[in-house]
């Protein structure tokens, strides 16, 4: 059983007026709703006193302390789902998530998720993410395929999360996007947050979280382009939002693509997380993994080649 984890940090300059639940979620690497629950349970303190208001406004220099209780046995059921594990040891695993698979259980997707498969195939998972997100350090969208890091204990979870927060985890994607480019490479910068009128979508909005995507052309296709995209930050739907914002949505994207796509791609966006690199939390070794995209992706790549 994991032990309770405690996270402490003084509020940095420039974060005047930030909500406590937002800050606590980042500090402990949990979701905002999970941070809100910890606040209600009296597990979050400011300057030594428990703070019960999620919307409490912070000031620089305030000491924030978050206690994440030890994980309890997960109610999520282990399921015998095929899972490709590229690497694992006592601290972590690198797994391949196929497109169409949700990372963790949620309303409408209580089973058949990556977490259900992890509980079957791995002997241990970190508990920081709570009962429905054991081991989950970062996520990729349901219809995006590719590599994911999984933490097998809380110490590794904290270390890997810190690397992600410090932008030192190397993450690269391949995508087939609509249209052609004059340039060979470029950078898209735009703060990402919830769409002001459609809460299921993300958008570039004032006051959103900083987001930076670097892209380069790998191959010019018929009416489309194969690109590599590297993330400096890792916001929800980041590549999809950024590429759509410059007029090159990911082919097959049902949310950010055009209403009438030039090609009838089924199964969602042609986006693949093909490379991940990080420093091992125990050995300090630099590790790098790559994986080829699924047949669906390569089918369209061959179909659109000039």
Image (cartoon, rainbow, N blue to C red):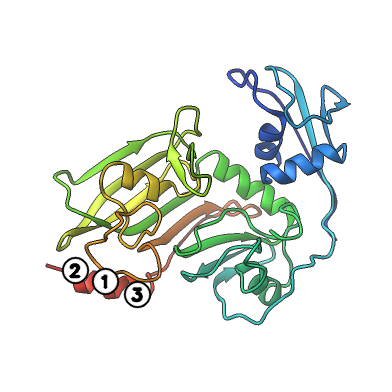
Mark 2 nearby-residue class (10 Å; few <14, some 14–19, many ≥20)? some
Residue 281 locus on image (x, y percent): 63, 52
Number of marks present in the image shown: 3
Q: Quadrant of residue 206?
A: top left
Above or below, 173 against 182 in this view is below
Residues under numbered marks 1 and 3 in contact, where contact means CB atoms less than 8 Å apart? yes
Mark 3 nearby-residue class (10 Å; few <14, some 14–19, many ≥20)? few
Q: Quadrant of residue 87?
A: bottom right
Image quarter of the C terminus: bottom left
Mark 3: secondary structure:
helix
Left or right relative to 239: residue 284: right
- Residue, x 72% and y 60% (percent of image)? 132
* Residue underneath mark 1: 300
Mark 1 nearby-residue class (10 Å; few <14, some 14–19, many ≥20)? some
* Residue underneath mark 3: 296
Residues under numbered marks 2 and 3 in contact, where contact means CB atoms less than 8 Å apart? no
Mark 2: secondary structure:
helix
| Residue 128 vs residue 169, the one in the foreground | 128
Residue 226 locus on image (x, y percent): 25, 59
Q: Which dot marks residue 11?
A: none
Left or right relative to 287: residue 229: left
Residue 124 locus on image (x, y percent): 74, 67
- Residue, x 69% and y 77% (percent of image)? 120
Residues under numbered marks 1 and 2 in contact, where contact means CB atoms less than 8 Å apart? yes
Q: Alpha-carbon distance for marks 2 and 3?
A: 13 Å
Image quarter of the N terminus: bottom right
Above or below, 127 against 6 in this view is below
Mark 1: secondary structure:
helix
* Residue underneath mark 2: 304
């Amino acid at each position: 059983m994991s032990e309770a984890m405690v996270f402490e940090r003084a509020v940095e300059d420039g974060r005047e007026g930030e909500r406590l639940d937002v800050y606590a979620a980042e500090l402990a690497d949990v979701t905002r709703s999970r941070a809100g629950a910890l606040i209600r349970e009296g597990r979050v303190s400011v300057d030594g006193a428990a703070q019960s208001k999620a919307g409490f406004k912070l000031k620089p220099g305030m000491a924030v302390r978050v206690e994440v209780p030890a994980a309890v046995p997960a109610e999520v059921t282990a399921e015998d789902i095929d899972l490709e594990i590229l690497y694992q040891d006592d601290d972590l695993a690198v797994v391949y998530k196929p497109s169409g698979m949700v990372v963790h259980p949620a309303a409408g997707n209580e089973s058949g998720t990556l977490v259900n498969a992890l509980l079957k195939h791995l002997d241990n998972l970190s508990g920081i993410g709570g009962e429905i997100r054991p081991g989950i350090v970062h996520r990729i969208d349901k219809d995006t395929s590719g590599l994911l890091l999984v933490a097998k204990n809380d110490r590794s979870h904290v270390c890997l999360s810190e690397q992600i927060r410090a932008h030192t985890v190397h993450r690269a994607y391949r995508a087939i996007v609509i249209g052609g480019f004059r340039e060979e490479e470029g950078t898209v910068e735009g703060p990402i947050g919830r769409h002001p009128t459609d809460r299921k979508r993300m958008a570039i909005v004032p006051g959103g979280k900083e987001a930076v995507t670097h892209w380069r052309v790998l191959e010019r296709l018929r009416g489309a382009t194969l690109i590599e995209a590297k993330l400096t930050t890792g916001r929800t739907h980041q590549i999809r939002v950024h590429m759509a914002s410059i007029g090159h949505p990911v082919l097959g994207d049902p949310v950010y693509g055009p209403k009438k796509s030039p090609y009838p791609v089924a199964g969602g966006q042609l986006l693949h997380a093909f490379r991940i690199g990080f420093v091992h939390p125990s050995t300090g070794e630099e590790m790098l993994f790559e994986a080829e995209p699924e047949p669906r992706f390569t089918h369209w790549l061959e179909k659109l080649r000039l």
